[in-house]
């Protein structure tokens, strides 16, 4: 699964959910860790190198947690449709 490079503003609960989802889909922190952390930071940056909380990536395009989930659902539906009809 390919995830676009972006920053996401999150609540603590959303951060936990998103991190677990990313780890389950072979994403890691830039350090290589797959451990839920920094849930109170409020922003996660998703990059091609992994997840980070470094403000160095603050210029990335921002997406809401809800829009992130909606995009994932759309991608999965399209994938299933392609498998069925192509």
Image (spheres, rainbow, N blue to C red):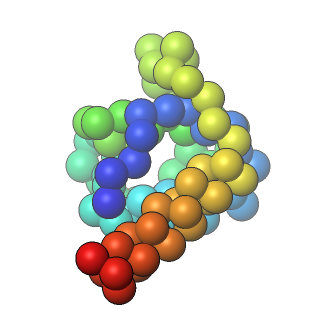
Compared to residue 25, the image places residue 63 above or below, namely above
**Image x and y of residue 29, in percent:** 35, 46
Residue most toward the right? 11
Looking at this rendering, what residue extends furthest in the front direction?
85
Between 72 and 83, the one lying in front of the other is 83
Give the image location of residue 12, x and y in percent.
71, 53
| Residue 77 location (% of width, % of height) | 50, 72
Q: Which quarter of the figure is the C terminus placed in?
A: bottom left
Horizontal relation, residue 37 to residue 11: left or right? left
On the image, the x and y values in percent for residue 43 come to: 62, 35
Q: Is residue 16 visible?
A: no
Q: Which residue corresponds to the image point at 63% horizontal and 36% vertical from the top-left? A: 63
- For the question of whether residue 46 can be seen, the reply is yes
In which quadrant of the rendered image does the N terminus lie? bottom left
Q: Residue at x 61, y 29 (%)?
A: 62
Q: Is residue 78 above or below residue 44?
A: below
Query: Which residue is at 45% across, 68% downward?
Result: 78
Residue at x-position 56% and y-position 45%: 38
- Which residue is more in the foreground, 81 or 16? 81
Q: How many numbered marks have been drawn onto this rendered protein structure?
A: 0
């Amino acid at each position: 699964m390919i995830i676009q490079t972006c920053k996401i503003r999150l609540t603590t609960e959303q951060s936990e959910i998103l991190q677990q989802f990313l780890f389950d889909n072979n994403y890691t922190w830039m350090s290589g860790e797959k451990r839920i952390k920094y849930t109170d930071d409020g922003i996660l940056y998703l990059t091609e190198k992994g997840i980070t909380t470094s403000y160095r990536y603050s210029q990335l395009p921002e997406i809401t947690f809800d829009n992130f989930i909606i995009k994932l659902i759309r991608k999965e539906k399209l994938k299933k449709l392609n498998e069925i009809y192509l």
